[in-house]
Amino acid sequence: MKMNWEHIYISEMTDEEYAYGLSLMSGERRLKVNDFLYDEDRRRTVAGELLARRMISSFTAMPIDEISFAVGKFGKPYVLNGGVQFNVSHSDNVAVCCVDTAPVGIDVERIRPINPAVLKRVCKDGDRDYIVSGELCKELSKAQLYRFFEVWTAKEAYLKRIGTGIRDIKTVSFEDIKSGIKFFELDDYLISVSL
């Protein structure tokens, strides 16, 4: 099988699905989820894991309740017993997951206004040139916002694929990684998958 990605609208997850997803988690993970301050963070996390379990089960034919996860050195989760790679992301009301036999990374973000100062914190000069092609303004245009989220989600997906976490996002150049990224749109969300 080749890479597959799917999404779930978190607001459409029933209380029964939430309880089921929570029951599938390890005791340690369940405690972490229950410690989240906000219900929406708990629901996003459970939705992401339930989506991942469903996709992994479909991909491998392994029963959903027999899938076991562990976490790598930099926090990337992996399947202990399935010979499959996966990655999960969520933003606002959407959780996404991708599954493959090779390492994958996925990121989703809702395209929304941002403070242009963020570009200086997360973008290399070439990234900024691609996004704004000129002087920074007080507000980014619709096209500039779209390009910003292309860069942002591509970099996050790439860093998640290689398993180092996103702390080094400014060190990665969009130009260097964009050929290994597939972009998808879902409503007002942009999704990047790094293969």
Image (spheres, grey):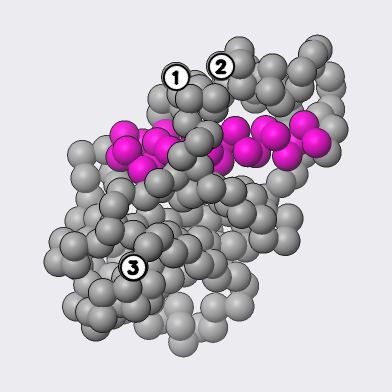
Residue 166 in view (yes/no): yes
Q: Up-down: is 101 above or below 1?
A: above
Secondary structure beneath disc 1?
A: helix
Q: Are marks 1 and 2 in contact (CB under 8 Å)?
A: yes
Instruction: Determine the residue positioned at 66% across, 56% down.
Output: 185
The Cα atoms of the two marked residues, 3 and 2, are separated by 36 Å
**Crowd band around label 3 with a 10 angstrom C-alpha radius: few (<14), some (14–19), many (20+):** few
Residue 171 shows which numbered tag?
A: 1
Residue 68 shows which numbered tag?
A: none
Q: Which residues are magenta?
A: 143-166
Place of residue 188 in the rendered image (x, y in percent of width and height, measured from the top left): 73, 55
Q: In this rendering, would 116 be left or right of 137?
A: left
Instruction: Determine the residue positioned at 75% across, 36% down.
Output: 145
Q: Please state which of the two labelled residues, at mark 3 or mark 2, is closer to the viewer.
A: 3
Query: Which residue does the numbered mark 2 point to in the structure image?
Result: 124
**Crowd band around label 2 with a 10 angstrom C-alpha radius: few (<14), some (14–19), many (20+):** some
- Mark 3 belongs to which amino acid? Met
Secondary structure beneath disc 3?
A: loop
- Mark 1 belongs to which amino acid? Thr
Residue 159 lies in magenta, yes or no?
Answer: yes
Quadrant of image for the N terminus? bottom left
Query: Which residue does the numbered mark 3 point to in the structure image?
Result: 1
Q: In this rendering, would 135 be left or right of 65?
A: right
